[in-house]
């Protein structure tokens, strides 16, 4: 995969910037949060997990510590250089075809909300292609109304500030989102395209790839478990 910036996505700040505008050093500083525990509670002990868009391993490392066998995929070699304890694969998600299947496929980081509908379907197609019989796809999507009433600001307990500065419509239901991450010694920005998805829209997108929602894993419905449709 080349290093050309993806359309509508860019980032600024110290260090390497990935094709989708993510700053590698920034992501080495961000905490994993509750996500690894949400995933661990939704899959069988010792499961084989395919993590799509693993970044620097924020979730990979806790999942490995939980005893899962993880294959971690990212299109950025600079991101993958930070991953430990897992098999790593350098590839775009859309083109990935490992020729094997997994107990669980994880598509986190709100990738399903990509502004490009064709890209979204390609991501979900990769999930379905690698899903073992009886397996599950775990998706993280944006919450309803996340990009309204901006600007907003959140101070993380770790000592940095996250600002969602703006959300500008660019047509066809897509918004251009501008975010800032301010640390005491550095600031990073990221611009990306986001397409909000209602439950019905997510159902339709999954159905195109032979998948269906099995359960919502969090009260805010941002984490979704899907399986092959009956």
Image (cartoon, rainbow, N blue to C red):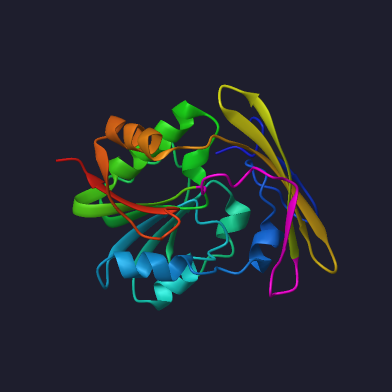
Residue at screen point 67% across, 34% down: 176
Foreground: 221 or 92?
221
Residue 48, how many percent across, how many down?
A: 29, 63
Foreground: 173 or 124?
173
Residue at screen point 54% across, 66% down: 58
Question: Is 144 inside the magenta-drawn segment?
Answer: yes
Residue 106, how many percent across, how many down?
A: 39, 54
The residue segment tinted magenta is 142-160
Instruction: Choose top left, top right, bottom left or bottom right for residue 36.
Output: bottom left
Residue at screen point 66% across, 28% down: 169
Q: Residue furthest top?
A: 172
Residue 115, how many percent across, how many down?
A: 55, 32
Foreground: 84 or 11?
11
Instruction: Choose top left, top right, bottom left or bottom right for residue 8.
Output: top right
Whether residue 95 can be seen here: no
Whether residue 172 can be seen here: yes
In this rendering, would 153 be left or right of 125? right
In this rendering, would 168 be left or right of 113? right
Residue 37, how many percent across, how many down?
A: 42, 71
Instruction: Choose top left, top right, bottom left or bottom right for residue 50.
Output: bottom left
Q: Main secondary structure of the magenta part?
A: loop
In this rendering, would 27 be left or right of 52? right
């Amino acid at each position: 995969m080349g290093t050309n910036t993806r359309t509508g996505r860019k980032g600024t700040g110290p260090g390497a910037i990935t094709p989708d505008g993510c700053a590698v050093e920034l992501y080495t500083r961000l905490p994993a949060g509750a996500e690894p525990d949400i995933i661990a509670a939704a899959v069988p002990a010792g499961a084989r997990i395919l993590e799509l868009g693993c970044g620097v391993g924020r979730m990979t490392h806790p999942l490995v510590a939980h005893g899962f066998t993880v294959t971690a995929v990212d299109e950025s070699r600079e991101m993958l250089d930070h991953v430990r304890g897992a098999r790593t694969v350098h590839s775009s998600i859309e083109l990935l075809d490992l020729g094997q299947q997994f107990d669980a496929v994880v598509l986190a980081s709100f990738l399903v909300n990509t502004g490009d509908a064709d890209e979204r379907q390609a991501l979900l197609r990769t999930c379905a292609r690698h899903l073992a019989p009886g397996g599950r796809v775990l998706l993280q999507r944006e919450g309803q109304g996340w990009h309204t009433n901006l600007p907003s600001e959140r101070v993380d307990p770790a000592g940095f500030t996250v600002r969602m500065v703006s959300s500008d419509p660019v047509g066809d239901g897509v918004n251009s989102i501008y975010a800032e991450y301010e640390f005491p010694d550095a600031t990073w920005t990221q611009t990306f395209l986001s397409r909000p998805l209602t439950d019905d829209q997510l159902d339709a997108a999954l159905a195109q790839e032979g998948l269906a929602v099995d359960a919502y894993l969090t009260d805010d419905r941002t984490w979704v478990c899907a399986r092959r449709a009956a």
